[in-house]
Image: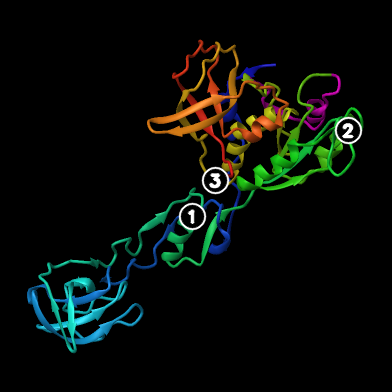
Amino acid sequence: MKLLSVEAARTAMVAEASALPAQTIPLQTANGRVLAQDVAADRAQPPFTNSAMDGWAVRAADTPGALAIVGESAAGHGYEGALAPGQAIRIFTGAALPDGADSVVIQENAARDADEVTVPAAAPGDNIRDAGKDFRAGDVLLTKGTRIDPWRLSLAASAGCAEVSVHAKPRIAILSTGEEIVEAPAVPGPFQIYDSGSPALKVMCEAWGAEATKLSGVRDQLDAVIAAMRGAEADLIVTVGGASVGDHDLVRTAAEALGIRYRVESVAIRPGKPTFFGVLADGRRLLGLPGNPASAFVCAELFLKPLIAAYCGAAHAPRMATARLAAPLAANGPREHWMRAKLTYKEGGITAQPYRDQDSSLVSVFAAADALLRRPPSASASAAGDLVEVLLLDRAG
């Protein structure tokens, strides 16, 4: 089988995942979704010049001195008249600046006595927010392809958006295979293990913006694997296990029975070499991941996450950073190696400590890691303190 580099494999996969059609949804439900259209402002923000502080709206030319208090301007209730020479208006943060005023004196710097207030010298523009300071009517605030988060949702809301156009979520069907896999609360037999891969992949897919369904696991029977694949209602089928070439690895055979056209046959990566990707005869895409959890999760980060982003209409590149090695590493072999690592943040940068045991079956190591350390193919030995690339994992804290 032809081995592709990680970058070439990712490029080939993403090329087969077009953005899904647009749908209009309420803004309040749009967190995590990707915009299918730009979001533009209906009006300026702020729509009027206003005060940045509690204090007194004045004419700078009248300061310093004692001024007659003639009214009040509060947020949502502006002063209707115009400020004349020698006058001051009590004003509060966010309230509209009255006509005629050009400055706000903060309340701590003024002294009120009945119907007069004595203010120090002020300059035009003091403590004032101009109309349109944040954005103006017609400004494009968020562009197509942007993923909505709480801060961007706030920006869209401030622009008067009640609804936004987003790409539909891709439907992902996750299928685990293997006689050795059972799902809790079922009791495993003496030679079986609990399924730790597909439950985590389902949550990953949902966090990355997809609708994910975990299909019932199937045993190592070709007809059962074919039937499960054929019945999956999905844009992308993700299989876990059975992707290699052993006697009990039936996923590729099943995919070939369904007319797969391979785009990626195998990847020059460690862990995860058996990973493959292709297009079934009916147009559905299929991503085959290895069965070992670490292999599956590494390849999910590198390939499944970008695929979901492409379906959602968003660009995606792994979140990479530069760190210094905490310990020396031996020279790498011919495959790109992604090592689970722990990061330490210090003054002067990030330190990466790869875990000593990188066995791809170890779920506990992946649960503790917060980064994947990239070792290029045939990299020479590295000393403690050398710079390395790390992919930052989304961890809960």
Q: Secondary structure at mark 3?
A: loop
Q: Which mark is residue 219?
A: 2
Q: Which residue is mark 3?
A: 313
Determine which quarter of the picture holds residue 95: bottom left
Q: Residue at x 21, y 77 (%)?
A: 56
User: Quick one: 60 or 147, which is closer to the camera?
Assistant: 60
Q: Which mark is residue 37?
A: 1
- Disc nearer the start of the sequence (3/2): 2
Vertical placement of residue 394 versus 350, above or below: below
Vertical placement of residue 355 versus 109, above or below: above
Check disc 3 and give the amino acid type. Answer: Gly
Highlighted magenta segment, given as a residue range = 247-267
Q: Secondary structure at mark 2?
A: loop
Check disc 1 and give the amino acid type. Answer: Gln
Determine which quarter of the picture holds residue 253: top right
- Between label 1 and label 2, give the one nearer the viewer: 2
